[in-house]
Amino acid sequence: MENEIINRVEKSGLLQVNLDDYYPKGERVTFDLKNILVNEFVLIEKDFRAFVKNNDWSVYQNQYVNVICSADAIVPLWAFMLIVSSIKPYAKKVVMGNQQDLEKAIFNDIFDALDFTEFADKNVIVKGCGHHPIPESVFVDFTNRLQDVAKNIMFGEACSAVPLYKKK
């Protein structure tokens, strides 16, 4: 048994957390108001309201949706509010903003529901590499919440973790 491989990370008591494990399944889509503006520039209220009334919003069923206007146009806030309120009954989540804003909102809900006491007085490594497009701000938010309970927080891989926090 001289050549037995020993998992030192497992024996060390380090808890590795990969935010990919929390990434919820579901299609992410963008609704761009630009496409319903006249010449991608002007919002005509009567036409806009007719579009909202007649559009099939069920196409957003069980999707994560971010609402933007990519045109260089001045769009009143109520237009975004009207679109979001039309999509909300169908979508898993809908936000005004870009895709990173959407991911932040999704993870905020996940973290609000997460029982962080499972990390109480633990040495935690937050893995940085993943397969999903998780914004950097989500890692910062997770670390912020984790700091309330964890003994130590590190970032990266066990072989080259960067220390972030140590409870006094």
Image: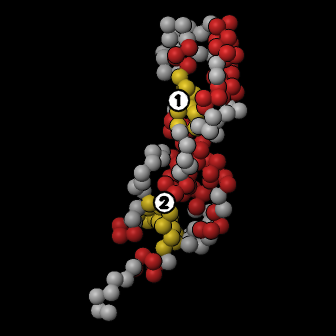
The residue pinned by badge 1 equals 30
Residue 71 shows in this picture: yes
Task: Indicate the position of residue 137 as horizontal and vertical percent values.
Answer: 51, 46
Q: Residue at x 57, y 28 (%)?
A: 67
* Total numbered circles: 2
Residue at the far bottom: name it.
1
Q: Residue at x 42, y 51 (%)?
A: 131
Name the kind of residue labelled 1 in the image. Answer: Thr
Task: Indicate the position of residue 20 as horizontal and vertical percent values.
Answer: 49, 54
The residue pinned by badge 2 equals 18
Q: Residues within 10 Å of mark 2 (few under 14, many from 20)?
A: some
Q: Residue at x 61, y 47 (%)?
A: 108
Q: Quadrant of residue 74?
A: top right
Residue at the far left: name it.
3
- 50 on left or right of 41: right
- 135 on left or right of 157: right
Task: Indicate the position of residue 24 as horizontal and vertical percent values.
Answer: 56, 49
Task: Indicate the position of residue 50 as horizontal and vertical percent values.
Answer: 67, 11
Name the kind of residue labelled 2 in the image. Answer: Asn
Using the image as rendered, state which of residue 53 and residue 84 is in the foreground: 53
Q: What's the CA distance linking mark 2 and mark 1?
A: 26 Å
Q: Residues within 10 Å of mark 1 (few under 14, many from 20)?
A: some
Secondary element type, mark 2: strand
The disc placed on residue 12 is none
Residue 164 shows in this picture: no
Is 51 placed above or below 56 here? above
**The C terminus: image quadrant:** bottom right
